[in-house]
Image (cartoon, helix red, strand yellow):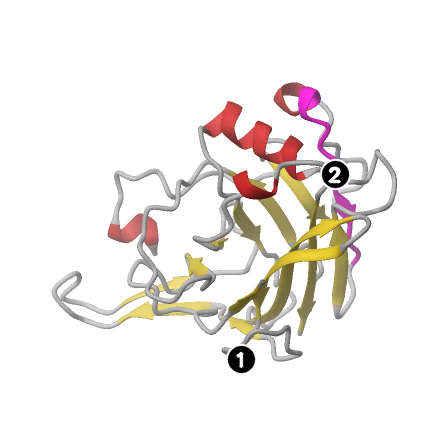
Amino acid sequence: MLDFLQPDAGWDTAAGTGTLDVIITTRSEGQSNSGGDLAPFNIPDPITNTQENPIDGEWGAGGTTETNMLVSDLLNYLMATFDATIPVFTFDQNETGGNPDLFALAMVEIVDPEDGVLRAWFLDNVNNSSFDDSPVLAPGEICITPDSISPDEECFTTNVGSGAFDYLLFAPTMDLTPWADADNLFRVTWRFSDVDDGGEEITLTGRFAPTVTVPEPGTLALFGSALLALVAFGRRTSTRD
C-alpha cells in the first residue's frame, strides 16, 4: 500500500532471508546475525520458530553474552549503518495455509539486569498503560476506498509470503539514546495466533526513518497494513514508564 501511495520512496524492499538487517525470528534454521556489517556490533542470533499455532518468542535477554542485546550495541549499529536512533520492526508473514489473516501481540522492553524493566512499549488492542492479552489483527487483504488518491478501489494482499515486507512497525518514542548506558538490555517478546503456516519473520532495521508525527505519544504506528494516515491495525497501543 505504501509503495502504491509513494512509489518513489523505496518501500517495496525485498525481505528474503539473506537480504535482511537484524533478524529477530525466522523459520529458516542456521541464520546468524554475526556476519557482514553486523559482526562488530554483537547482535544475538535470531530465534527459530516452527510451524505451529500460536507462535511465542522472546529475543534479546537470554541471560548470556551470546543472547543478550545490549541497548548500546543496537544503538551503535543503527547509528553507524542508518544514522538512526529509533529501531523499525519489519514483518514478512507467510500465511499460505488458507487464511491470510493473522493476530499479533508484541512487547519491547528496556531491561536493567538488576532493577528490572525500565521502559516498555506494547502492541495490543487496548489503549491503556499495560500489556493486555488482546491481539491486533494483521489483515490478509487491505483496500483503499475511492478518494482523491485513487479514483478506484485498490486492494492489496498481504501475509502470503510475497518476499516483501507486509508491514512495518515503530514507536516514535523508542529513541534508544537515553537507555544506552550501563548493561541495559533490549528485549522483544511476541505472539502470533491463527497461524496456518508458521513462516513468520520479524526483523529490525533503521532503514525506514520514522518521519510521521503521531498524535498519541508512544503509539505504535503500523505501516503497510493500513498506513500512511496511520489508520490501520494497531493504533490502540500504549507505553509504560
Reply above or below: 3 against 238: above
- Identify which amino acid the numbered label 2 is placed on: Asp
Residue 219 magenta-drawn? Answer: no
User: x, y (%) of residue 218?
Assistant: 46, 61
Q: Which residue is more in the foreground, 123 or 33? A: 123
Region rendered in magenta: 39-50
**The quarter of the displayed image where residue 67 is located:** top right
Does residue 12 appear anywhere in the picture?
yes
Estimate how packed mark 2 is, as few (under 14), some (14 to 19) or many (20 or more) residues with alpha carbons within 10 Å. some
Q: Nearer the viewer, mark 2 or mark 1?
A: 2
Q: Earlier in the sequence, mark 2 or mark 1?
A: 1
Query: Looking at the rendered structure, which numbered label has been put on residue 135?
Result: none
User: x, y (%) of residue 46?
Assistant: 74, 42
- Identify which amino acid the numbered label 1 is placed on: Val
On screen, residue 216 versus residue 9, left or right, reads right
Residue at image point 71% right, 60% down: 198
Q: Which residue is mark 2?
A: 183
**The quarter of the displayed image where residue 146 is located:** bottom left
Residue 40 magenta-drawn? Answer: yes
User: x, y (%) of residue 160?
Assistant: 55, 59
Count the marks: 2
Estimate how packed mark 1 is, as few (under 14), some (14 to 19) or many (20 or more) residues with alpha carbons within 10 Å. some
On screen, residue 53 versus residue 206, left or right, reads right
Query: Looking at the rendered structure, which numbered label has been put on residue 126?
Result: 1
The quarter of the image holding the N terminus is bottom left
The kind of secondary structure element at disc 1 is loop
Kindly report the distance in space between the C-alpha atoms of the residues bearing marks 2 and 1. Answer: 31 Å
